[in-house]
C-alpha cells in the first residue's frame, strides 16, 4: 500500500470521489495507515479533459491496470494499455496520451472500475461534495498545507476528517435502481443523485442483463432528464398557436372532443399509438382505453416499423414472437451468426459479451452484412452480401444442410411440421443461384454453410437490416427455418434472437399494444378470448370489437383518407418514424383532433391540438421487458419535473373522466390485473420483481 500511495496524492476531503465508492480511500481508512511512507511526487502530465463524459488524471493514477483489463477483456474494445517501461507510466489510449481522437467508445467501464479518482465522470465534477467546488488557486495551497500538517500529526486525523466528509455526502446522495431506456438489452444499474442533479450511473454486479457493463448511452446519456426544453405543462392549440393550460382544462378538452367523435363516427374513427419506451403498465392502459372505452382495436406501437416482421417470422416457425433464450445462451454458443445487425453500435453490451466469448473461449463468429462494421472486422468469416438478398442466402444455407447431411433429422422428425414440403421449396436455392443474386462466391457460401453445419450450437441474431425490408417477415422466416433445419432450437445456447431496438418494444407488444391481439398475444378475433377479457373488465363481449384494428401504417392511410378522425399518440415520433413523412404530415393535418403525450415538443406534437407533458422512466415506477423477454422493475429516481405526470397517471385520470374509474394507485395494481387475466404473465408481481432474478426464472417456468 505504501508503494501504491507513492503514485497517488491523498486529498480525499476535497476530492470528488470521496462518496464511499473510492476503493483506495476505503483501504487507507480500514488499514489505519499512520503516515505516507514514500513521499508522493507529481508527474509531468496534465489532466485530460478531452473526452466529453469523463476525465483522466495521470497524477492520481496508481497503475493498477483495472481499466486496461476492463477495456481489453471485458468490454473488448481494446483501446487502453499501460506502458510500464516509460519513465512515467500512465494509461494510454491507442498508445497515445489523449483520449480525444482514439478508438474509445466511451462505454464508461474504465471509469466504473477505477479504484480512485484517476478516471472520473464529469458529472461528478466539481460539485460532488461540500468542499470540492473551490477554485484551483485555493484548493492547491490548501492541499499543500494539509500535507505538511499530516507529516507532523500523522494521517489518522486527516483521514478522520475525510470520513466525516464522506458520511456527509452519503447522507445527501440517493441511489436508485433503474433500467436503461435506450436499446432492448435492458441494462440495469443504480443512478446516484443529489436533489435533481444526476451524479453518475453505477452498474452493479448482479444486474441480470449487463452485470457491470455499460455503454455510452446508459452510462452517460441522461442530460435530457433536466433539459430546459422538457414539457412541463399541458398545452392547448388556439388559433394556430399553443398556450399553457391546466390539467383540468386539457383533459376536459380531450374528453369532450374524443367523446364527440366517438358518438358521431364510432370507435374505429379513433386511433391510439402507444410508446415502446413507456412501461408495460402504460402499454396495458393504452390498449385498455382503446378497446374498453372506445370499442376499437386501432392500437399499435413502433414495433410495427421494426420488430413485427421478426415477430411474424418467429410466429410462423416456432409459434412465439420473442428471443429463444437469454444473453447467457448467446455467450455460450459455439457459433454466433449475425445478419443485418450492427450490434456493436446498437446493442453494445451484448456485443461485448459476444466479443468476450470470441476472444477468450473460442466462439466462432459469422457475419452477413453489406456494411463492414466492427463485428464484421472481428468475424471468422464475413460475407458482404448485396442488400435485399438475405432470404436467398438463408434458403441456400438451409438447402445445403439437407444436401450435405447437416440437417438434424431426429429433431425435425420429432419437433417440426411440413419438413418435406419445406425441403421441396428449397429446390431453386443452389449455391450457384445464391451466388448470382447475393454477390458472394460459391466458395464463400460453402465456407459459411460448413461453419453452420459443423457448429455444436448456434445462435442467430438479426435486426433492422432484415426487418426493415418489404420482405422482412419472409426473411425472418427463412432465418428461423435455417435454425430449425440444424436443430438449433429448444436447447441451451441456440435459437433466434431478433435484437429489439427500443427499450420496451417487446413489452409494449407483450402487453397488448397491437391491433390484432390482447395482452399475452391473445387474438382479438377469437370469441373465447373476447369473452374472457370482457368478463375480466366487467362488460358484455359486444362492447369489445371482434375485428382486427388498424395498425400504425393503416391509421395514417385512414387519416389521409378522412375515415380516421382522431389520434392519441404517446411517446412516439410518428411524424418521422412512418415512411413518406410528407404524407404523414398531411394525414395529421387532416385529423379533426389529435393528442400527443410526450416529454418534449416533438415534430409529431407540433400537429397536436392538445399536448400533455409526460415523464421519462426516471420520474416514475414501472416495468420493462428486454430483448431476452426478461421483465425488470424500475423505480422513481427523481420527482416529475414541473407539472409533468407519469403516463400511467395521465391515462388513469383520462379513463376516470371518460366514465371508467379504475382506481389504480400504483403501477403494481396494473401489473396485478394484467397477470390475473393474461396467462403469459401468471405469477408476475411487483414483490417478485423486487428480486430481479425472479423475472427470468418466471419466464423459464
Image (tube, helix red, strand yellow):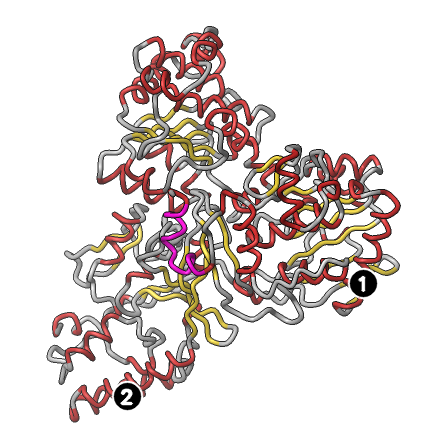
Taking depth in this image into account, of 126 and 254 the one nearest to the observer is 254
Q: Quadrant of residue 662?
A: bottom right
Q: Is residue 284 above or below residue 479?
A: below
Report whether 343 appears left or right of 57.
right
Judge whether residue 696 is colored magenta: yes
Quarter in which the C terminus is drawn: top left
* Comparing labels 2 and 1, the label whose residue is closer to the camera: 1
For the residues bearing labels 2 and 1, Cβ distance under 8 angstroms: no
Report whether 123 appears left or right of 549.
left
Q: Residues within 10 Å of mark 1 (few under 14, many from 20)?
A: some
Element type at mark 1: helix
Circle number at residue 161: 2
Residue 657, given in percent of the width and then of the height, sits at 76, 61
Residue 219, given in percent of the width and then of the height, sits at 42, 58
User: Which residue is located at x 80 percent, y 63 percent?
Assistant: 252
In whole angstroms, how far apart are the C-alphas of marks 2 and 1?
A: 58 Å
Residue 183, given in percent of the width and then of the height, sits at 48, 47
User: Which residue is located at x 38 percent, y 19 percent?
Assistant: 485
Element type at mark 2: helix
User: Which residue is located at x 24 percent, y 78 percent?
Assistant: 10
Question: Which residues are drawn in magenta?
Answer: 687-698
**Mark 1 — residue?**
252
Among the two numbered marks 2 and 1 on one chain, the one whose residue lies closer to the N terminus:
2
Q: Is residue 510 above or below residue 139?
A: above
Residue 590, given in percent of the width and then of the height, sits at 84, 43
User: Which residue is located at x 36 percent, y 75 percent?
Assistant: 16
Judge whether residue 345 is colored magenta: no
Amino acid at each position: 500500500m505504501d508503494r501504491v500511495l507513492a503514485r497517488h496524492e491523498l486529498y480525499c476531503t476535497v476530492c470528488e470521489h470521496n462518496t464511499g465508492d473510492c476503493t483506495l480511500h476505503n483501504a487507507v481508512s480500514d488499514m489505519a495507515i499512520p503516515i505516507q511512507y514514500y513521499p508522493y511526487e507529481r508527474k509531468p502530465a496534465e489532466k485530460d479533459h478531452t473526452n466529453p463524459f469523463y476525465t483522466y488524471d495521470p497524477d492520481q493514477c496508481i497503475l493498477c491496470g483495472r481499466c486496461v483489463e476492463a477495456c481489453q477483456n471485458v468490454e473488448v474494445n481494446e483501446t487502453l494499455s499501460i506502458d510500464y517501461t516509460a519513465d512515467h507510466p500512465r494509461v494510454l489510449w491507442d498508445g497515445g496520451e489523449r483520449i480525444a481522437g482514439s478508438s474509445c467508445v466511451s462505454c464508461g467501464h474504465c471509469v466504473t472500475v477505477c479504484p480512485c479518482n484517476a478516471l472520473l465522470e464529469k458529472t461528478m465534477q466539481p460539485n460532488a461534495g461540500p468542499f470540492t467546488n473551490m477554485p484551483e488557486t485555493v484548493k492547491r495551497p490548501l492541499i499543500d498545507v494539509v500535507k505538511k500538517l499530516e507529516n507532523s500529526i500523522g494521517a489518522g486525523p486527516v483521514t478522520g476528517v475525510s470520513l466525516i466528509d464522506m458520511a456527509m455526502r452519503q447522507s445527501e446522495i440517493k441511489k436508485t435502481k433503474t433500467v436503461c431506456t435506450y436499446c432492448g438489452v435492458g441494462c440495469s444499474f443504480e443512478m446516484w443523485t443529489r436533489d435533481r442533479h444526476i451524479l453518475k450511473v453505477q452498474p452493479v454486479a448482479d444486474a441480470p442483463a449487463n452485470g457491470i457493463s455499460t455503454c455510452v448511452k446508459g452510462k452517460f446519456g441522461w442530460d435530457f432528464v433536466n433539459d430546459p426544453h422538457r414539457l412541463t405543462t399541458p398545452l392547448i392549440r388556439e388559433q394556430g398557436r399553443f398556450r399553457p393550460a391546466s390539467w383540468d382544462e386539457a383533459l376536459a378538452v380531450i374528453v369532450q372532443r374524443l367523446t364527440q367523435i366517438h358518438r358521431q363516427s364510432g370507435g374505429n374513427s379513433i386511433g391510439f399509438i402507444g410508446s415502446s419506451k413507456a412501461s408495460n403498465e402504460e402499454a396495458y392502459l393504452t390498449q385498455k382505453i382503446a378497446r374498453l372505452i372506445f370499442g376499437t382495436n386501432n392500437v399499435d406501437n413502433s414495433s410495427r416499423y421494426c420488430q413485427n416482421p421478426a415477430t411474424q417470422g418467429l410466429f410462423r416457425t416456432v409459434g412465439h414472437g420473442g428471443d429463444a433464450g437469454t444473453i447467457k445462451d448467446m455467450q455460450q454458443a459455439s457459433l454466433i451468426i449475425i445478419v443485418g445487425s450492427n450490434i456493436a453500435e446498437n446493442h453494445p453490451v451484448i456485443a461485448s459479451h459476444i466479443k468476450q466469448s470470441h476472444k477468450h473461449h473460442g466462439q466462432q463468429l459469422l457475419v452477413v452484412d453489406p456494411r463492414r462494421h466492427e463485428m464484421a472486422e472481428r468475424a471468422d468469416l464475413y460475407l458482404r452480401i448485396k442488400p435485399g438478398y438475405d432470404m436467398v442466402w438463408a434458403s441456400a444455407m438451409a438447402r445445403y444442410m439437407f444436401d450435405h447431411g447437416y440437417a438434424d433429422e431426429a429433431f425435425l422428425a420429432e419437433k417440426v411440421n411440413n419438413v418435406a414440403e419445406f425441403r421441396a421449396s428449397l429446390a431453386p436455392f443452389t449455391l450457384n443461384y445464391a451466388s448470382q443474386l447475393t454477390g458472394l462466391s460459391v466458395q464463400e457460401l460453402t465456407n459459411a454453410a460448413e461453419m453452420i453445419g459443423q457448429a455444436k450450437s448456434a445462435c442467430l441474431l438479426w435486426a433492422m437490416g432484415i426487418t426493415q425490408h418489404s420482405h422482412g417477415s419472409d426473411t425472418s422466416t427463412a432465418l428461423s427455418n435455417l435454425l430449425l433445419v440444424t436443430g438449433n432450437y429448444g436447447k441451451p445456447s441456440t435459437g433466434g434472437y431478433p435484437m429489439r431496438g427500443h427499450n420496451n418494444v417487446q413489452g409494449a407488444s407483450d402487453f397488448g399494444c397491437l391491433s390484432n391481439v390482447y395482452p399475452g398475444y391473445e387474438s382479438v378475433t377469437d370469441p373465447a378470448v373476447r369473452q374472457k377479457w370482457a368478463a375480466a373488465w366487467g362488460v358484455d363481449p359486444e362492447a369489445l370489437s371482434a375485428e382486427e384494428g388498424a395498425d400504425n401504417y393503416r391509421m395514417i392511410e385512414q387519416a389521409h383518407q378522412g375515415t380516421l378522425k382522431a389520434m392519441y399518440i404517446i411517446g412516439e415520433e410518428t411524424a418521422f418514424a412512418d415512411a413518406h413523412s410528407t404524407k404523414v404530415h398531411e394525414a395529421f393535418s387532416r385529423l379533426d383532433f389529435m393528442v400527443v403525450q410526450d416529454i418534449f415538443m416533438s415534430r409529431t406534437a407540433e400537429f397536436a391540438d392538445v399536448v400533455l407533458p409526460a415523464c421519462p422512466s426516471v420520474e416514475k415506477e414501472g416495468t420493462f421487458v428486454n430483448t431476452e423477454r426478461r421483465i425488470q422493475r424500475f423505480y422513481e429516481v427523481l420527482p416529475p419535473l414541473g407539472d409533468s405526470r407519469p403516463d400511467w397517471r395521465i391515462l388513469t385520470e383520462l379513463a376516470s373522466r371518460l366514465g371508467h374509474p379504475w382506481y389504480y394507485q400504483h403501477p403494481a395494481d396494473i401489473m396485478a390485473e394484467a397477470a390475473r387475466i393474461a396467462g403469459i404473465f401468471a405469477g408476475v408481481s411487483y414483490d417478485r420483481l423486487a428480486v430481479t432474478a425472479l423475472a427470468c426464472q418466471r419466464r423459464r417456468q
